[in-house]
Amino acid sequence: MGQLFEARAGGRLSGRIRVPGDKSISHRAIMLGAIARGTTRITGFLEGADALSTRNVFAAMGVRIDGPTDGRVLVEGVGLHGLAEPAGPLDCGNAGTAMRLLMGLLAGQAFASTLIGDESLSARPMRRVADPLVAMGARIETREGRPPVRISPAPEGLHAIRYPMPVASAQLKSALILAGLYARGETEVQEPAPTRDHTERMLRGFGARVSTEGATVRIRGGQQLTATMIDVPADISSAAFFAVAATIAPGSDLILEHVGVNPTRTGILDILRLMGADITLVDEREVGGEPVADLRVRAARLRGIDVPRELVPLAIDEFPVLFVAAACAAGRTVVTGAEELRVKESDRIAVMETGLRALGVDARATPDGMVIDGRGDLAAPAFSGGRVDSHGDHRIAMSFAVAALRAAGTVHIADTENVGTSFPGFVALARRAGMDLTSREAT
């Protein structure tokens, strides 16, 4: 029957909490540790379904991986060319990041492989990654641009290309950088707008030379990686739910500990601050090449804004909960340039519009974003109670749980099983922070 969230109206957030480790960094730590020489030690690893899919894929290619145990993982690297041909298809589950990055990494291997995923991932587009890889000499077949993805050894190996990306996508950029490790010559990728740079930072941590000049990233093929230690910071995409929750719930004062504040990921903080949020970075520091800080978030009156287009790629995963913030703001919020939201785990523009309207919000989807007229009155609810469907999308489910803080009645959220893909323990942590949230079997 599936899982259902019951989010009861009202509440405020307080205390100190630490959300799980960063999913993007957890994926990359396993991948690069696997193709490095030596033992990579990872702490703070996200023990969610998506990151575990990446772990299992590399185990299926002969990499010894111990853990995760309490966020600790040991990866016995096999070197750049030490992966073994898997006995069957490599199952990425719901992890689009894993599949797209693996396409780049596997394109340069001497064996064939097939990438598969769950029903949601099997509907997501892969051609934008496959096409430039084919231009590098890769042999890749898809089912009309979607998984399964079949990768055969490149007859003459991969060669470097210069590629101006048509869209701002960290997954596409990272896939090409990983393929560039296996290519002859120097691969050059040009971004139309900045995207998260975890791959570049982590490759440098493993000893690779990766240059970044403005919007251009370059990597020369054939570089061997050396094992290292990685401390995964708390995921800012997960912290975003609590940052919005503490902002919209009157009387809240919450500290989010050890959050990754990589400048290519802090669009969520920049947008919330433009709307009037009270968010302070405390004890800023650097851990393993990644900037980290504690976030203090206090309740604030928000105002509607036109979200700057240059911030959109830096907050692309956080827009579902930003739409919730917009519904609580005074005036109109306009989001444009976010068409990438339509090809996530769900069509996040359409699903959020439907859910917001079901809760009484004046929300209108556009081809590349959303227009939301917020209520803005802290003394009155911003949402009615009601039932919404998350369509199996973890970020949609958690966003509507946050919305209940300003609802007039209980919000029932259907199809929430996939919350564990990115945020295991979300319900327990939400309750600890001050939200009245329960999970049960749907009837």
Image: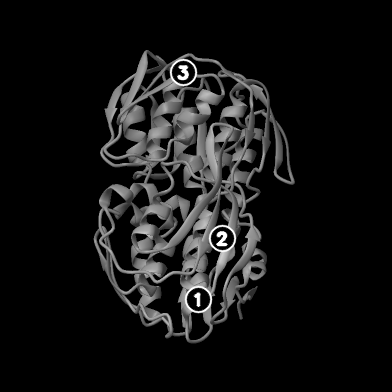
Which of the two marks, 3 or 2, is nearer to us in this view? 3
Q: CA distance from mark 1 to mark 2?
A: 29 Å
Which percent across, then down, holds residue 419?
57, 61
Vertical order, 71 against 219 (above or below): below
Q: Nearer the viewer, residue 243 or 220?
A: 243
Q: CA distance from mark 3 to mark 2?
A: 37 Å
How many numbered marks have been drawn onto this rendered protein structure?
A: 3
Q: Residue shown at 50%/74% (left/top)?
A: 249
Amino acid type at mark 1: Pro
- Point out the tag, 1 or 2, that comes first from the N-terminus: 1
Three-letter amino acid code of the residue under disc 2: Asn
Q: Secondary structure at mark 2?
A: helix
Residue positioned 26% across, 51% down in the render: 309
The residue tagged 1 is 250
Q: Position of residue 17 (x, y in %)?
A: 64, 58
**Residue at point 58%, 24% (across, down):** 35
Up the image or down, 30 lies above or below 53; here it is: above
Measured Cα–Cα span from mark 1 to mark 3: 48 Å
Name the front one of labels 1 and 3.
1
Identify the residue position indicated by label 2 in the image: 418
Residue 52, position as x, y percentages in the image? 63, 45
Mark 3 residue type: Arg
N-terminal of the pair, mark 3 or mark 2, is 3
Looking at the image, residue 381 sits to the left or right of residue 188; the answer is right
Q: Secondary structure at mark 3?
A: loop
Its colouring scheme is: one colour
